[in-house]
Image (cartoon, grey):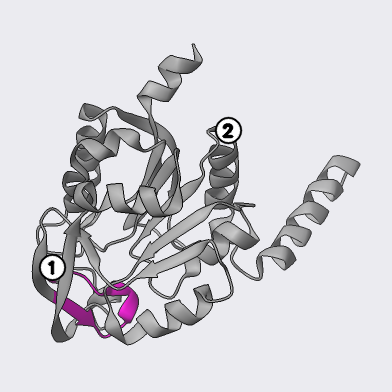
Amino acid sequence: MNRYGRELSDRWRAMRLAMGGRVHQYPEIQALRRFLAAFKVDCVFDVGANRGQYATMLRKDAAFTGTILSFEPNPDIFAELSRHAASDRRWHVFNMALSDFDGTAGFNIMAADQFSSLKKPAAGQDAIFAERNKVTRTVEMECRRLENLLPQLQAAHGFARPFLKMDTQGHDLSVCEGAGGALGMMTGVQTELGVRPIYEGGTGYRAMIDWLAEHGFVPSAFFANNKGHFPLLVEMDGIFVNQALLAAAD
């Protein structure tokens, strides 16, 4: 092995140790670090927060020091999310779902809680998900449109350049539609893109990319959001930049 090869090997080994076995997240972290810094993001909407894994990654790995607003409807894990956020004065949590309406709806708690969703599991989902992505019970949950919620959040937290991250298990398009005109305020959007959708009525990746393009957001980065499921990709994440920012930079 030549010197260059040894340096790459050493860097890879160091990265594996630093990431604690989360090497598949490295492209996401690198893309986020660059995006959040380049566009001076001061607030991240963490929609579908689960236990706070994404917010923790922003702090520990992506060097983000701004405001984080985490939304998690699952009552079973919201207390855990609250505990994780309690020592961080710029991390605020909300036990509700964001959607395209204000009201209540049945939220499906799945066997593996990270799959819980306002959507129902698809009948023809891949076998690797079937046991984990099945409904164990349904609870009534508050739903809000981001467009109606944004003014009070902005008044309370004083942000000017927010970023919208969604991991709502097949419901991301509804979150975007509920943002209405407020979507144009976002510096960027991170969304889960279903290549082989595992929820009924889940938006396919082509349709989601087209919808975002129609609303002024263009791709910045794509990466698998899990370790793979070789040889077929099931889902990926995409980061999209507000095209107005690119025009302003010209």
Magenta stretch in the rendered image: 107-120
Q: For residue 50, which quarter of the picture?
A: bottom left
Nearest to viewer (mark 1 / mark 2): 2
Q: Residue furthest top?
A: 250
Residue 120 is situated, as x and y percent measured from the top left of the image, at 12, 71
Classify 107 as above or below 99.
Answer: below
Q: Which residue is tagged 2?
A: 38
Q: Residue furthest right?
A: 3
Classify 244 as above or below 90.
Answer: above
Classify 139 as above or below 66.
Answer: below
Residue 142 is situated, as x and y percent measured from the top left of the image, at 17, 71
- Residue 122 is labelled as 1
* Residue toward you, 130 or 88: 88
Q: For residue 49, which quarter of the picture?
A: bottom left
Judge whether residue 26 can be spotted in this image: yes
Q: Secondary structure at mark 1?
A: loop
